[in-house]
């Protein structure tokens, strides 16, 4: 059974997720200019916030990517719980490109410019 959703929460998080401090941040990936790999072009977090708060937890993340069918084309979802990265989910079109997607997210966390 699905848990009741809290109406004021982003994306209708369930009560357990809200209590655990779990958030999901989405990023849009596009093919890199050189043609090999991907790059982050848009996201719900600013590049500055991604660099300052999530660079270290991303470096410590050792899990693998899972596929989430309801994500849009070239989307990546980073699920966080308090101060750690809990999971990374990708759209079905990015399945099988784990190394390129992780490299794109790590490169985005290292960026110092103020815009995607």
Image: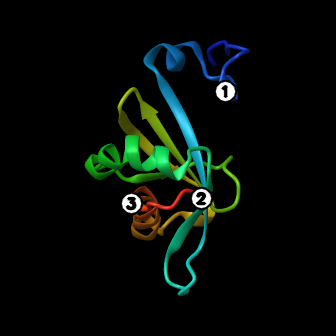
Q: Residue at x 48, y 13 (%)?
A: 19
Q: 92 or 88, which lies in front?
A: 88
Q: Nearer the viewer, residue 101 or 82?
A: 82
Q: Residue at x 66, y 50 (%)?
A: 71
Which of the two discs, 1 and 3, labels the residue nearer the N terminus?
Answer: 1
The residue pinned by badge 3 equals 110
**Image quadrant containing the N terminus:** top right
Determine the secondary structure under disc 3: helix
Nearer-the-camera pick, 24 or 14: 24
Query: Disc 3 or disc 2, which is closer to the eye?
Result: 2
Q: CA distance from mark 3 to mark 2?
A: 13 Å
Classify mark 2: residues with Cα within 10 Å, few (<14), some (14-19) or many (20+): few
Q: CA distance from mark 1 to mark 3?
A: 27 Å
- In this view, the mark in front (1 or 3): 3
The quarter holding residue 4 reads top right
Whether residues under marks 1 and 3 lie with C-beta atoms below 8 angstroms apart, the answer is no
In 3D space, how far apart are the residues under numbered discs 1 and 2 (Cα atoms)?
23 Å
Q: Are marks 3 and 2 in contact (CB under 8 Å)?
A: no
Residue 94, percent from left and from top: 56, 65
Q: Earlier in the sequence, mark 1 or mark 2?
A: 1
Asked which secondary structure carries label 1, the reply is helix
Regarding mark 2 in the picture, which secondary structure is present there? Answer: loop
Q: What residue did someone put label 1 on?
A: 10
Res 104 label: none
Image mark for residue 115: 2
Quadrant including the C terminus: bottom right
């Amino acid at each position: 059974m699905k848990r009741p959703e809290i109406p004021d929460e982003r994306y209708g998080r369930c009560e357990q997720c809200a209590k655990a401090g779990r958030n999901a941040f989405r990023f849009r990936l596009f093919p890199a200019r050189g043609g090999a790999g991907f790059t982050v072009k848009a996201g719900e977090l600013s590049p500055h916030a991604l660099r300052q708060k999530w660079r270290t937890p991303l470096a410590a993340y050792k899990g693998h990517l899972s596929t989430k069918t309801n994500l849009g084309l070239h989307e990546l979802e980073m699920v966080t719980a308090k101060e750690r990265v809990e999971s990374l989910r990708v759209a079905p079109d990015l399945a099988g490109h784990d190394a390129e997607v992780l490299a794109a997210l790590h490169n985005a966390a290292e960026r110092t410019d103020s815009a995607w």
